[in-house]
């Protein structure tokens, strides 16, 4: 059996997780990391596509990922240089409970004799602790912690849910399309890293620059073809982070606890709004701390935000969150203009 070729370990909490090694998408409900016995990372598994699709497709992809990992293992250590980029990046703390945001309430061990669930550090709390670390220091939150582990969908390509890294669709006019990527291509490597899953591609993008180019190799019609994937300035802001658990924390930080959604084209026209301007409808206003700042300021569900800070152009909720976390600090006051029942308010 396939799994008999691996030593399988289930990690049930993140309290004592070694963050130098275990770096993955902390917002996912299921993630897997595949290591060599010496600690070298072969690959990662788990994606938002897998969470949306049926378990049968996820299982098929996992099987292919495990088989691909075995191929890497057979080539090890001769291929160790190609795996260098898959290893963890430097972190400020070794374990989650060393972060100031968590250290007062959590310890390395669970409270097995008392409140077990309340003593458990959940994975999404790790990403939240990273962001809080930067905010507490008065620093801009790095883009990779606002838009963590972005999928290739951000650049215009969708990967099949039942395979390692096979391109399913490519949207016209996107960086993926301009690179020459085509539906049916099997992504073999990205930025020099061998890909054995969609999560591997997301890891490459997580560590990618804010602007630049990534070399890629695809298998097309049984032949290897080299491509270059261009990363335009600000490319991460095309990520949709609205469904991430960690986004609730970011909404509290810079949106006062509001959930925003882009106004539909018909609603824009009906409200007499410019198609190129900001039009974010308030879908939800938080009721309780720390998500009630917008409520206290007088925002209401149904308000349409036309300007926030110095931004007036069309932007998504995800893009606005990124702008504010990069450019504003705790305690700053923002000028916001809204449309409410036909009246413009500031």
Image (spheres, grey):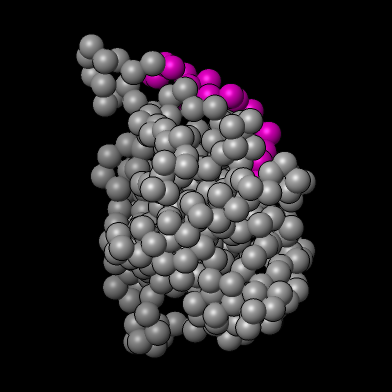
Give the total of numbered labels.
0
Instruction: Please say whether residue 53 is visible from this viewpoint.
Output: yes
User: Is 336 placed above or below 224 here?
Assistant: above
Is residue 235 covered in magenta? Answer: no
Q: Residue furthest left?
A: 114
- Dividing the image into 4 quarters, which one contains the C terminus? bottom left
Asked which quadrant contains residue 94, the reply is top right
Q: Residue at x 72, y 41 (%)?
A: 77
Residue 61, image x, y percentages: 43, 61
Residue 170, image x, y percentages: 55, 80
Q: Is residue 201 left or right of residue 101?
A: right
Q: Is residue 292 left or right of residue 93?
A: left
Q: Main secondary structure of the magenta part?
A: loop
Q: Residue furthest front?
A: 1
Q: Write the start and end of the magenta stretch as one range.
A: 84-108
Q: Residue at x 59, y 77 (%)?
A: 185
User: Is 209 placed above or below 10 here?
Assistant: below
Q: Residue at x 35, y 73 (%)?
A: 343
Q: Is residue 310 left or right of residue 120?
A: right
Q: Is residue 211 left or right of residue 61?
A: right
Residue 263, image x, y percentages: 38, 75
Q: Residue at x 56, y 39 (%)?
A: 35
In front of the other: 171 or 86:
86
Q: Residue furthest top?
A: 113
Instruction: Please say whether residue 344 is visible from this viewpoint.
Output: no
In front of the other: 275 or 334:
275
Residue 320, image x, y percentages: 52, 60
């Amino acid at each position: 059996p396939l799994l008999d070729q691996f030593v399988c370990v289930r990690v049930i909490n993140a309290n004592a997780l070694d963050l130098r090694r275990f770096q993955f998408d902390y917002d996912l409900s299921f993630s897997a990391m595949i290591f060599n016995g010496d600690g070298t990372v072969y690959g990662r598994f788990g994606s938002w596509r897998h969470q949306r699709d049926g378990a049968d497709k996820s299982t098929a992809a996992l099987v292919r990922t495990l088989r691909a990992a075995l191929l890497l293992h057979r080539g090890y250590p001769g291929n160790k240089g190609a795996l260098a980029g898959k290893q963890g990046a430097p972190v400020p703390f070794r374990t989650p409970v060393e972060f100031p945001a968590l250290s007062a309430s959590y310890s390395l061990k669970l409270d097995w004799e008392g409140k077990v669930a309340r003593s458990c550090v959940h994975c999404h709390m790790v990403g939240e602790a990273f962001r809080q670390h930067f905010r507490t220091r008065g620093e801009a939150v790095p883009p990779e912690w606002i838009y963590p582990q972005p999928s290739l969908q951000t650049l215009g390509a969708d990967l099949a849910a039942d395979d390692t890294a096979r391109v399913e669709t490519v949207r016209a006019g996107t960086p993926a399309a301009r690179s020459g990527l085509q539906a049916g291509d099997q992504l073999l490597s990205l930025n020099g890293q061998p890909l054995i899953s969609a999560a591997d591609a997301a890891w490459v993008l997580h560590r990618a620059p804010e602007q630049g180019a990534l070399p890629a190799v695809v298998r097309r019609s049984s032949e290897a073809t080299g491509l270059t994937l261009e990363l335009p300035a600000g490319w991460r802001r095309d990520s949709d982070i609205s469904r991430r658990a960690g986004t609730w924390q970011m909404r509290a930080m810079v949106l006062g606890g509001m959930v925003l959604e882009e106004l539909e084209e018909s609603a824009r026209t009906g409200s007499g709004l410019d198609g190129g301007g900001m039009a974010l409808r308030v879908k939800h206003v938080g009721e309780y701390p720390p998500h009630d700042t917008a409520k206290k300021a007088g925002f209401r569900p149904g308000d349409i935000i036309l300007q926030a800070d110095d931004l007036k152009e069309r932007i998504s909720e995800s893009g606005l969150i990124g702008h504010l976390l990069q450019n504003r600090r705790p305690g700053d006051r923002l000028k916001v203009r809204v449309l409410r029942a036909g009246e413009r308010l500031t």
